[in-house]
Image (cartoon, rainbow, N blue to C red):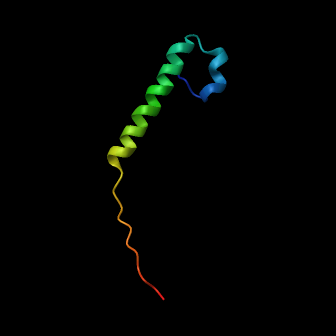
Amino acid sequence: MHSHGGPIVLPVVDNRLMFILAVVVGVIVTALMVNALKKNVEVVEDDVL
């Protein structure tokens, strides 16, 4: 069984604790990967008159 649909499927999920744990772990892994893979961008200010 795949957990598609987010929290709306929580009433029909067999093991609710593992579903919530899987969502939390997914959020943490995604946040870490985004921070690890994003490029640092320098902001250059131009004095335009």
- Give the tally of numbered discs: 0
In screen coordinates, is 16 left or right of 44?
right
Q: Which percent across, then down, holds residue 38? A: 36, 51
Residue nearer the viewer, 7 or 4 = 7
Residue 16 falls in which quadrant of the image? top right
Q: Looking at the image, which residue is at 42% across and 32% down?
A: 28
**Vertical order, 16 against 33 (above or below):** above
Say if residue 1 shows up in the picture: no
Residue nearer the viewer, 49 or 9 = 49
Q: Looking at the image, which residue is at 37% across and 38% down?
A: 32
Q: Looking at the image, which residue is at 62% across and 26% down?
A: 7
Q: Which percent across, then down, holds residue 35? A: 37, 45
Q: Which percent across, then down, holds residue 18? A: 50, 15
Residue at the bottom extreme of this rendering = 49
Residue nearer the viewer, 20 or 43 = 43
Q: Looking at the image, which residue is at 36% across and 61% down?
A: 41
Residue nearer the viewer, 15 or 28 = 28
Q: Which percent across, then down, holds residue 47? A: 42, 83
**Vertical order, 17 against 9 (above or below):** above
**Vertical order, 47 against 27 (above or below):** below
Say if residue 7 shows up in the picture: yes
